[in-house]
Image: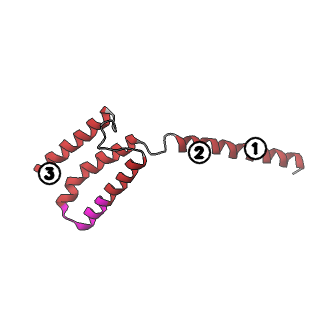
């Protein structure tokens, strides 16, 4: 292989690495990052899991569930979500949480 072919390979590798860095950056700074919607989705999921976890009376499950809640609180706080604040959530996010709470409340009362 002569120097010209090596130079071409080096240039191609450099371009490939550059393209991969750009693509990775796009994912990191957009869709793959944490968002208020993903936190609300996880809250809804956690709310739906709560009655089953509590009914199980399994201390390990309850402890793991409590830890998930704490992590979710940290994520919400990192995103500036103050759930006690009136404007913290969109109307859709509020509705999803309210619906999840009503559903979980119905299961608990059974």
Q: Nearer the viewer, mark 1 or mark 3?
A: 3
Determine whether the residue tagged by mark 2 lies in a helix, strand or loop.
helix
The dominant secondary structure in magenta is helix
Q: Which mark is residue 108?
A: 3
* Residue 68 on image: x %, y %: 33, 57
Circle 1 is placed at which residue position? 12
Determine whether the residue tagged by mark 1 lies in a helix, strand or loop.
helix
* Residue 52 on image: x %, y %: 20, 55
Mark 2, residues whose alpha carbon is within 10 Å: few (<14), some, or many (≥20)?
A: few
Color encoding of the figure:
secondary structure
108 horizontally vs 74: left or right: left
Picture layout, residue 29 above or below residue 67: above
Mark 1, residues whose alpha carbon is within 10 Å: few (<14), some, or many (≥20)?
A: few
Give, as a single range, the part of the protein colored magenta: 56-66
Marks 2 and 3, how far apart at CA: 44 Å
Q: Which of the two residues, 20 or 62, is positioned nearer the viewer here?
A: 62
* 4 in the magenta segment: no
Circle 2 is placed at which residue position? 24
Q: Residue furthest top?
A: 91
């Amino acid at each position: 292989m002569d120097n010209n072919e090596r130079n071409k390979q080096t240039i191609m590798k450099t371009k490939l690495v550059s393209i991969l860095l750009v693509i990775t950056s796009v994912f990191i700074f957009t869709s793959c990052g944490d968002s208020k919607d993903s936190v609300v989705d996880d809250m809804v999921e956690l709310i739906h899991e709560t009655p089953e976890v509590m009914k199980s009376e399994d201390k390990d499950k309850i402890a793991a569930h409590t830890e998930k809640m704490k992590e979710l609180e940290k994520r919400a706080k990192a995103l500036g979500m103050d759930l006690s604040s009136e404007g913290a959530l969109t109307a859709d996010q509020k509705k999803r949480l309210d619906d999840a709470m009503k559903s979980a409340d119905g299961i608990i009362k059974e």
